[in-house]
Image (cartoon, rainbow, N blue to C red):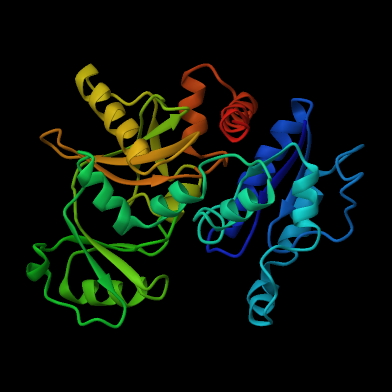
Amino acid sequence: MKIVVLAGGTSTEREISIVSGTGICKALRERGHQAILVDVYCGNDTLDPATAFEGEYDVDAAAAYMRSFDDKIREMQASGKEFFGPKVLELCKAADVVFLGLHGKNGEDGKVQAAFDLLGIIYTGSGYLGSAIAMDKSLSKKLFLESGVPTPAGAILKKGEPTKELWEYGLSLPCVVKASCGGSSVGVYIVNTQEEYETALAEAFTYDDVVVLEQYIKGREFSVGVVDGVAYPIIEIAPIHGFYDYKNKYQAGSTIETCPAELSETDTAKMQEYAVRAFHALQLENYARMDFMMNEDHSMYCLEANTLPGMTPTSLLPQEAAVLGMNFGELCEKLIEVSLRVRRQ
């Protein structure tokens, strides 16, 4: 199968996307597919769509080519460069499927998905609507509540509007401040003092014009993959220091991850049920990953959905799949399989 693994892009998660894309591309080539790694924003004008999938291919060299643009991205954006890079759309049209290894803004938020729908390009993951809804943490929270999925109490703040005292939002310290449309815990802060709260608000607004204030849940953290409408084994994430932020997500040895999580059968079934319910509430398709907190009295809270979960060596969904006896390459093929079935209907 001819596959474009689309990664890179312009978000704060560009590097993680390149790591994910590199791993996916290598795994698919090891399983006999004609997979190539392409940067959605920078493209590669040396590739001919008619021959790009043929012959030997150096995935690491492709990743290095992508990284050669890292210091130029902001300058390219300032110059008014269009989003899709040279040959990107031509290569994607020539492929049997595009495996989306993108993360964050302009990749996981439905914009690329909408463009591909218009162009008839088949891709992995959720469609444009579910992707856009899930990327917006404030909208996700509303839909969770309407669908009976427990989620922390919170409030929505918009840039430029006057802010109130925490108690006026029904919240108190400690609390969580997070940019509404961020990913990989970028723009997320746990604050314990008024000074930290004010600083976190200012910083969160540099990432997005909408910020979510949220009740802080002290307890255990979990994640549940949902693939083809079925919940995968639950994984527990226990950071050695702090919370599950960007560093702890991607630096090996920063967290203790246990899969399947040590939970009772009742709690396991309940969390998996909530994960599937959240998946449908956000109108997601094919696969996603739901993040949860559980406090000392076993109350569960769904924090958010990840529509293009990380596929790095330390990522959670591959660990969940491994418990089911599925190796990384088999998981990649599974995600393609379920996406093709939906997109070809």
* In-front residue for pair 331/296: 331
- How many numbered discs, if any? 0
Q: Residue at x 8, y 62 (%)?
A: 170
> Is residue 180 shown above or below 18?
below
> Quadrant of the rendered structure where residue 208 is?
bottom left
* In-front residue for pair 211/317: 211
Q: Is residue 68 visible in this depiction of the protein?
A: yes
Q: Residue at x 92, y 44 (%)?
A: 51
Q: Position of residue 280 (x, y in %)?
A: 36, 36
Q: Residue at x 38, y 65 (%)?
A: 187
Q: Position of residue 166 (x, y in %)?
A: 12, 69
112 left or right of 159? right
Q: Position of residue 293 (x, y in %)?
A: 25, 41
Q: Position of residue 311 (x, y in %)?
A: 56, 40
Q: Quadrant of the C terminus?
A: top right
* In-front residue for pair 193/332: 332
> Is residue 237 shown above or below 128?
above
> Is residue 231 shown above or below 243?
above
Q: Residue at x 61, y 49 (%)?
A: 117
121 left or right of 126? right
> Quadrant of the rendered structure where residue 13 is?
bottom right
Q: Quadrant of the N terminus?
A: top right
168 left or right of 153? left
Q: Is residue 16 visible in this depiction of the protein?
A: no
> Is residue 309 shown above or below 261?
below
50 left or right of 316? right
